[in-house]
Image (cartoon, coloured by chain):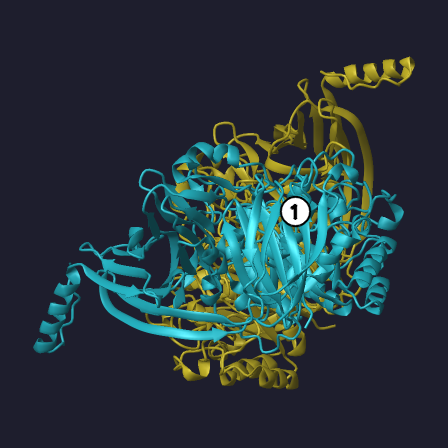
Chain colours: A cyan, B yellow
Amino acid sequence: MNLPRIPFLPAARRGLLLALLAWGATAQAEDIQSPNKQLTLSVNVQANGVPTYSLSYKGRPVLNTSKLGLELQNAVALTSGFTQTAATRRTVDESWNPVWGEVKTIRNHYNELAVTLSQPATKREMRVRFRLFDDGLGFRYEFPRQPELGYFVVKEEKTQFALNGDHKAFWLPGDYDTQEYSTVTSNLSQVRGLMKASTTPNASQTPFSATGLQTPLMLKRPDGLYVNIHEASLIDYSAMHLELDDKTFVLESHLTPDAVGNKGYLQTPCQSPWRTVLVSDKAADILQSKLVLNLNEPTQFKDVSWIKPVKYVGVWWEMITGKSTWSYTNQDNIKLDSIDYKTVKPNGTHGANTAHVKEYIDFAAKHGFDAVLVEGWNTGWEDWFGKHKDYVFDFVTPYPDFDVQELHRYAESKGVKMMMHHETSGSVRNYERHLEKALQFMNDNGYNAVKTGYVGDVLPLGEHHYSQWLINHYQYVLEQAAKHKIMVNGHEAVRPTGLSRTFPNLIGNEAARGTEYESFGGNNADHTTILPFTRLIGGPMDYTPGIFETKVSKLNPSNTSFVHSTLARQLALYVTMYSPLQMAADLPEHYNQHLDAFQFIKDVAVDWDDTKVLEAEPGDYITYARKAKGKSNWFIGSTCDEQGRTSKIDLSFLDSGKKYVATIYADAKDAHYEKNPKAYTIRKLNVTRKSKLTQYCAPGGGYAISVVAVN
Amino acid sequence: MNLPRIPFLPAARRGLLLALLAWGATAQAEDIQSPNKQLTLSVNVQANGVPTYSLSYKGRPVLNTSKLGLELQNAVALTSGFTQTAATRRTVDESWNPVWGEVKTIRNHYNELAVTLSQPATKREMRVRFRLFDDGLGFRYEFPRQPELGYFVVKEEKTQFALNGDHKAFWLPGDYDTQEYSTVTSNLSQVRGLMKASTTPNASQTPFSATGLQTPLMLKRPDGLYVNIHEASLIDYSAMHLELDDKTFVLESHLTPDAVGNKGYLQTPCQSPWRTVLVSDKAADILQSKLVLNLNEPTQFKDVSWIKPVKYVGVWWEMITGKSTWSYTNQDNIKLDSIDYKTVKPNGTHGANTAHVKEYIDFAAKHGFDAVLVEGWNTGWEDWFGKHKDYVFDFVTPYPDFDVQELHRYAESKGVKMMMHHETSGSVRNYERHLEKALQFMNDNGYNAVKTGYVGDVLPLGEHHYSQWLINHYQYVLEQAAKHKIMVNGHEAVRPTGLSRTFPNLIGNEAARGTEYESFGGNNADHTTILPFTRLIGGPMDYTPGIFETKVSKLNPSNTSFVHSTLARQLALYVTMYSPLQMAADLPEHYNQHLDAFQFIKDVAVDWDDTKVLEAEPGDYITYARKAKGKSNWFIGSTCDEQGRTSKIDLSFLDSGKKYVATIYADAKDAHYEKNPKAYTIRKLNVTRKSKLTQYCAPGGGYAISVVAVN
């Protein structure tokens, strides 16, 4: 190694320094344990100066020696030649209350080890900060401000997760532009063989490797250990994928590139997002982990009174199924500033017309919903998709048959909020150009939440939905919206990484196959038994459940899709698919046919004081119980896969001394997600914390229970 | 060929159609002549359906058979298989008055031929519209709205300009990001051999070919014919370069690509910019041509009272030379929102400090200048360049030593305007995000013009200064500025194409090597005898002349550059380098040393009722006479190359019956741009329209004359 030139240092100090450096040249190791001592992390700098870490759980190796570092463009890599120059430890045990969430109070309890690594040859320094929780590990790279590292360009992050063998994985094809794939369940050794068939068509997609995977990646080992890999606090950085070496089962970070292949532009002081590894021998612990949220920064919002969970209906499923249209005319090839819609023949199928929207408002008001989403309200939907069209929407001009002021007045008179929709078609510059006016338009017209959309390729082409340039765009929209006290529900944006702790107006995200795919051929019957272990690890999903009419052909005879779920399970999803933003996605007319079942959707809470996972196995079944915010009532939801099963739970989580009436919305004995989805039963039971319950779930089915305190 | 299926057409009509189609399958030709009949254009559709044109001047071929058309991405090319289905002709002879310009009234006189070309195999249609003026040709592609051509992506435009041999060319290396090269004078056959050495380093550059050239391209044939190729009305399209086949001397259009190689995203109805070919056997006709302006659309601005030509001084040359700095501190690696400049030590060299700017305001007021430009006024200049830094400036926050309100008050009290500077560092998204506030800030603080800058690579990387995405950005800035009644002077933006007719607030552009290069090693001595034939064909240039202290070392001892011009020629440039925006670029202290010569800069007009080219030969010399707007006074400027020469002009353009005093600012006998640049003489003469003048110009020299009416 080259000694740094330190000519003026006194001889004695120089001797000490040489001793330290000599010590640094041999392997260095630091260990820490989780608060409950079940997880042990070892951090090492190898003899060649390569920093590594490894992780074990109850003495069993979880991650073997895994390398750390980054390769830079036009600069020496930050992967080797390091000496450990400091290691600081601390323990944090605190708790905080989220603005909205699954529990009232979140404990943030970890042991921290921050290792400072110096690269003498370049006089650069980086720090790796590890936080070891009882349920897993988070770590990130930190780049302090320093003379020899100001601005730098990431060529690739080289973080390894060296698994201890060929685990069962619940995975999506790695892709720079979409997460809307069906989850594949296979061993890691089978990924390569399954990749091609698993990479199903999407409106925008850029797969990058035969063994590339997305996060959150859920793994289960033969010994029953569950491992989940994701990231937390993705800000000003590219989204991380994982590249699998299917010989060694080492996963390595693979960042989303920009148009010229660079993976990030950084300026010190700065840091990477946290890389997260959840570990437990109980699947329920993975679902209950708050590690990702805890690794995000507390919010700086001083006033959060305007952020409120929302239960909503909307003019949406009828377009998704093809019953009605987003567009007002059948005219093709339109230019926003030159078309006069009043002179063009309406197509007669436009969903977002004033009279029809009023029906939704009436329905929402009658049944106690907070808001009505309306898509297709603004001009431009005739040729919004796939045209590389820069000026595709202006976000403020309604179609002639959509009376913004009248609907504002009408909704307000009924105590219902309107929910805005901003589809960008990936034309993000155009959206930013109109954003301020669009947000002001929302303030002026009584909208307090917006569903954004990024369907199709990002413009300019070459940028990707998950590259740093777009990550910064989503962040910009979130922050501008906050200035207008507007909540954001981002569809086709990057999957969440717990940012809602810091920016609680990020009320929802899509970033996976939602209910819409039930109209595009259908989701797998086990889909919603997997998502809580994968997509939802990063944050809530606007899954839009509640489809009662599961045959799409009833809405559109030419659409042969069906919802791969029983009706009872559609109710369960309001509990199992956590979100502070829950849609009752079906049409009012379908709810009116099943008002007894619909009662559960009306009753179920969207914000919670407590959450229990009663049963869980990824891909097989999930049963949650949640306690409504500020109330004694609980809601239970259970879903299973295509096999069906019998769920056995006990209600010991209920308050002692309390009596409850449980209303159980369940699959009938002959129910089946494909053959007989609408066969459901509703029964009431008196229950206490001593009660136990055995409940059948049909194939592709589930159940929902409201547990209402009566004393 | 495939007949279109027309099943319901009556047999008789079908017969006619077949006849027409049969006629279409043979070569078709249309000729038109220019109003003065000196230019003849022939348009042909070859037997294979390839559209072509050719052009002759006084019977001599200018362009041989040249192909027309475009290649599309993922669609059949629009280059062959065409049938001419219509040809319409018309003559236009009108005149219009520009908001500002070289002449008071511009005549727009042409014969037009619009040829409609149908491609039966694809049922698509395009039109090529030719306008033949006395001084050249303009033509463009028009894509009418049609069922089979809505949106399309241009792979390449395949417009040929088949020259009639190996001409002498005044050329720049083709480049997607800069025009700041020294013009090379060589035969076309020599381009390839000279390309590498001619592609000198620049802050952002993307050369694309060993024979790629930029427009405007000035050509001179062995027979003395002058030809100039450029484009007009570049809107929503990529900038055109020319690819030279140096065996056949066919030039072919080469558009600027985006990050994925596409060259344009179009939606019908739409059109290409005009491709322009100026032709004359008099060099002066090229300079006096208004063809490019005429091919732009009339302005739609209802109120143009806020658009006014500007003569200005500024805090600029002192930074360019290294005498002072844009930055306020020597701190590196700053983040705008976290640095507190009040706590950072100032570097003591910051040019844009309040006291110093007041000196410029005083100087401007004393000498009758309209405005004072100040660069380096806003925070962020410490590390603004080459960092791929997204949030590089906010355009509204001044350095602590620049008091915006006080300077606004002070300038206003002196009757002087402040001129804004918005350097973007190529981070165009960041600029757009801040644009509205930045323009409002200008309105609030008395600025009515902005110099924009795009130094360095465009973000996101992959986009280019001249690609459609950027063209649309410059246009957006221009239009947003117009809403705030702000004039724009775009530096490092695309070279102009006559857009100022439509958007007269585009008051200036750089897009070539300006005076700043005199501090970066120097411009060639013949530089300003070429630019009017090349860069200025598209529109005015903010060349920033008027450097009296030509030794840069006098400002900064470590800078050995010198201005490749005599002092007298610096005066001439105010006449020869037409611009409605003229800077006196040197420091007040240098002007104070030569107040007699400075008088010309004070006197010279910046807007004109008439312009005459008295002498001209590209690369050798140029002599202009211009009549001040609304006055009887004329100003004459002459520049020559490194050889020196004696200019002989007569003043017959002066009004009959008028007497004038001419003040002649000329090179002394021993003047020389390198050895003795400041040797000048000033003399006065009484002149009339019968006067003739013989005036010596030193090597790299020139002269300037004010001709003031006395009766």
| Whether residue B551 can be seen here | yes
- Placement of B627 over or under A190, stated as above or below: below
- Counting from the top left corner in percent of width and height, residue A16 is at 11, 73
**Residue pointed to by mark 1:** A515
Q: Quadrant of the N terminus of chain A?
A: bottom left
- Counting from the top left corner in percent of width and height, residue A417 is at 76, 65
Nearest the viewer among B345 and A528 is A528
Q: Quadrant of the C terminus of chain A?
A: bottom right
- Counting from the top left corner in percent of width and height, residue B576 is at 58, 59
| Whether residue B453 can be seen here | no
For the point 30% across and 61% down, which residue is it? A40
Nearest the viewer among A519 and A676 is A676
> Is A202 left, or right, of A268 in this rendering?
right
Nearest the viewer among B41 and A688 is A688
For the point 53% across and 30% down, which residue is it? B165
For the point 14% across and 68% down, which residue is it? A20
Q: Amino acid at mark 1?
A: Thr
**Chain of the residue under label 1:** A
- Placement of A489 over or under B268, stated as above or below: below
**Element class at badge 1:** helix
> Is B415 left, or right, of A259 in this rendering?
right
Q: Residues within 10 Å of mark 1 (few under 14, many from 20)?
A: many
